[in-house]
Image (spheres, grey):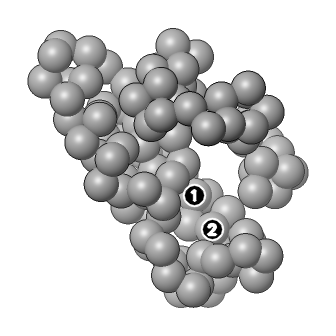
């Protein structure tokens, strides 16, 4: 996924590449906030709650993109549709938001 996003000039990395494999969700979220990185996750419950708690405490975050776990976005066939869903956001401001990615009709 990170490679596919890089191919369209979106700087992306993985939790493993940042040395946070196995870290708890709040730790990953905190690292993303510190690095001004948007989180892309299937874990809507934990990340929506963590983002809300962060905002309630007065913090800001770059945004959370949620991929609902369905077969459409499953790897490897789902990589390009997922890239299309991210591209469909265009220049939309997602700061401090949790955005659920949706299937792009022509993807």
Q: Position of residue 59 (x, y in %)?
A: 26, 15
Where residue 55 sits, quadrant-wise, is: top left
In the rendered image, the vertical position of residue 67 relative to residue 58, given as above or below: below
* Residue drawn at x 30%, y 40% as measured from the top left: 97
Is the residue marked by circle 2 packed among few (<14), some (14-19), or many (20+) residues within 10 Å? many
Judge left or right: residue 52 versus residue 69.
Answer: left
Whole-angstrom CA distance, mark 2 to mark 1, is: 6 Å
* Residue drawn at x 54%, y 20% as measured from the top left: 31
Q: Which mark is residue 86?
A: 1
Report the quarter where the N terminus lies: bottom right
Judge left or right: residue 53 versus residue 72.
Answer: left
Judge left or right: residue 44 versus residue 89.
Answer: left
Q: Is mark 2 on a helix, strand or loop?
A: helix
The answer to whether any part of residue 41 appears in the image is: yes
Tag 2 and tag 1, C-beta contact below 8 Å: yes
Q: Where is residue 72 in the image (x, y as percent from the top left)?
A: 58, 84
Q: Nearer the viewer, residue 20 or 59?
A: 20
Where residue 53 sits, quadrant-wise, is: top left
In the rendered image, the vertical position of residue 7 relative to residue 80, given as above or below: above
Q: Residue 82 carries which label?
A: 2
Q: Position of residue 65 (x, y in %)?
A: 46, 50
Where residue 58 sits, quadrant-wise, is: top left
Q: Which mark is residue 58?
A: none
- Residue farthest to the left, as pictured: 56
* Residue drawn at x 29%, y 35% as measured from the top left: 50
Q: Is mark 1 on a helix, strand or loop?
A: helix
Q: Nearer the viewer, residue 50 or 96?
A: 50
């Amino acid at each position: 996924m990170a490679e596919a996003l890089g191919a369209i000039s979106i700087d992306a990395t993985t939790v493993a590449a940042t040395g946070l494999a196995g870290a708890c969700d709040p730790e990953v979220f905190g690292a993303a906030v510190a690095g001004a990185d948007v989180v892309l996750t299937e874990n809507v419950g934990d990340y929506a709650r963590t983002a809300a708690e962060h905002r309630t405490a007065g913090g800001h975050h770059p945004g959370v993109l949620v991929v609902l776990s369905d077969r459409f976005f499953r790897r490897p066939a789902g990589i390009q549709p997922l890239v299309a869903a991210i591209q469909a956001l265009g220049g939309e401001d997602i700061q401090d938001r949790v955005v659920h990615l949706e299937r792009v009709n022509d993807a």
